[in-house]
Amino acid sequence: MSEENRDAVPDPLAKGGGSGQGPLTPGGDAADTPPEAIRAIPVRHYGRWAGAALVVVLLGMLVLAFANADIQWSVVGRYLNHETIVMGAVNTLWITLLSMLLGVTLGTVLAMMRLSGNPVLSAVAYGYIWFFRGTPVLVQLFLWFNLALIFPVLNLGFYSEDMNTVITPFVAALLGLGLNEAAYMAEISRAGIQSVDRGQTEAAQALGMSGNRTMRRIVLPQAMRVIIPPTGNEFINMLKTSSLAYAIQYNELFLAGRNISSRTLAVMEMLVVVSIWYLALTTIFSVGQYYLERHYARGSDHTPPPTPLQRVARQLTSFRTRPTLPEPATATAADGGTRHDGDGTNGSGDGTGRRGDSER
Amino acid sequence: MSDATTEAHGAPDGATGTGPAGGNGGLMVKAERVHKSFGLVQVLNGIDLEVRNGEVFCLVGPSGSGKSTFLRCINHLEKINAGRLYVDGQLVGYRQKGDKLYEMKEREVAFQRRDIGMVFQRFNLFPHMTALENVMEAPVQVKGLPKSEARRRAEEMLERVGLSDRMKNYPAQLSGGQQQRVAIARALAMEPKLMLFDEPTSALDPELVGEVLDVMRGLAEEGMTMIVVTHEMGFAREVGDSLVFMDAGVVVESGHPREVLSNPQHERTQAFLSKVL
């Protein structure tokens, strides 16, 4: 920086002999050309570099350890797409989807009950949440699974059946996981609904909209922005929690792995297989959640950040056009009046600026 | 419009029947000894006033005087505790049979509100919808208009408030003045017979106040009946047909805006005006 500035300074001085104002305007006497962009030597982060080196060494040791471990990777590969495992994964996905569906639906109803003016409804909803959040899922799964011990016959008046025929492992898992989830979803939806400004309801009512319509068209779509992220987390949690259903003989991924390992004695290998499947499933749904959140963020104060794909594309173009540094002022121009929805120029300026800093 | 009757607390005698002599008799709003309290706090202490058809009616007064609360009572966003409030000859929020009052069902209240447009201090646009969608929402959802028809009318309304180039923008991408104009267009799309403005320019930067007042002035010229809670005395003086000064939940003084503003009779009015003018 200093060298370049020194290069620049003599110029106005040389001319300044005439004007006498040279030193005061270091950018030269041409007022229309902006001053030269700052090219400072970045701060050196020696501590971080040492830390990074240490982490790389540790990673290498970990890889080495696993390479020499007594684990048959060929077995892992062979069972990765084994019929039993795939079946288990499908069942895991299936029970997760259904439990979440039950949880979200019942949870929304419970949230409405809690927010309703009726003390009976809100107390019952509160009691439900209190019980299902306060006991472990595993216990709840067994409670449903063993229901026949206290109610041998399911009698609905018009329909009567032996309880053991009704409560299959699938039904017990669905009830256990879904009803437990409803308690959590109730709290999540309630927080979402309450996060919507009261003025929104009033504006809708003033336009002559009924309460139901206001909820459906105005409040819930806005509540979604608050509800979706934790619901996505719940979904991903559920993918993993559903493995508890192995204890009540529901044939999901983890039980499938165990069944094979009890036959082949390849315990660690099957655990690795199962882990790979869980990782794959959670990764897919994390990506889905990301795009869902973007959808419900529309109309919010800030323009959505670029997607990873857009970021990669931008990174490539910014490497090509490196020399032009972004003007810092454009990134912070977030005044409501003049802002436009061009996330193209704004976003790229922001992104390259930050990334450039951390790399150097 | 008489001075407030502060003593009467109970509801007026049931003999009032269907209210102001059959139909509306040229009256859009009629308030009779309206009382409203929030818990122990008495906000409205017997408001009597009349708003004629086609009138621009300004409500002024210090904050906490109950003017916004009264405005919200007119479309039943707040329930009154005593007295009677009529819009276009109909009791607001209640049905009267003999000397008994029946609370209206939510659906009936919603039906009454269709004809009463409201503009809020904080705009309250729906942030997840574009300007156009904001204006289209109620005609489609409430009146059941076909989308194409609603869109055509919404575009017309937005053009009328000077925002035909901002239809696809979300509220967050609009300035305060633009948002408030969208809010006015949204209320107008329901073709109301009465418009309520609750301090429509109070949340705006000073240089954006004018554009909103211009739209309101245009509305007044077209003969819209408007009740405006405002601190814009210039607007009240220039556009208003009558003005009411409220303080502590009662009407202190009322009359033609020019008269009240330039020659206030009551000392509370004088004290208030000396601070804001």
Image (spheres, helix red, strand yellow):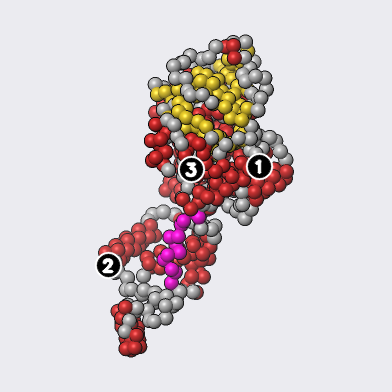
Label ID, residue A46? 2
Question: Label 2: chain?
Answer: A
Asked if the stretch drawn in magenta spans residue A336, the answer is: yes
Choose the circle earlier in sequence order: 1 or 3. Answer: 1
Q: Residue beneath label 3, please?
A: B232
Question: Judging from the image, what secondary structure is the residue with disc 1 in?
Answer: loop
Quadrant into which the C terminus of chain A falls: bottom left
Which residue is drawn at the image coordinates 47% and 20% (left, top)?
A: B5
Tell me if I can see residue A134 in this picture: yes
Q: Is residue A298 above or below residue A52?
A: above
Magenta-colored segment: predominant secondary structure: loop
Label 2 neighbourhood size at 10 Å, few (<14), some (14-19), many (20+)? few
A304 vs B161, left or right, is left
Q: Which residues are magenta?
A: A325-337
Question: Are discs 3 and 2 located on one and the same chain?
Answer: no
Q: Is residue B23 above or below residue A322?
A: above
Which residue is drawn at the image coordinates 52% and 60% (left, top)?
A: A343
Q: Residue beneath label 1, please?
A: B222
Locate residue A133, reporting x and y percent.
42, 30
Q: Is residue A9 above or below residue A148?
A: below
Question: Label 3: chain?
Answer: B
User: Rounded to the nearest whole Å, what is the CA distance between mark 3 and mark 2?
Assistant: 62 Å
Tell me if I can see residue A181 in this picture: no
Label 3 neighbourhood size at 10 Å, few (<14), some (14-19), many (20+)? some
Label 1 neighbourhood size at 10 Å, few (<14), some (14-19), many (20+)? few
Locate residue A124, reporting x and y percent.
47, 21
In terms of depth relative to the viewer, which is nearer, B170 or A67?
B170
Question: Judging from the image, what secondary structure is the residue with disc 2 in?
Answer: helix
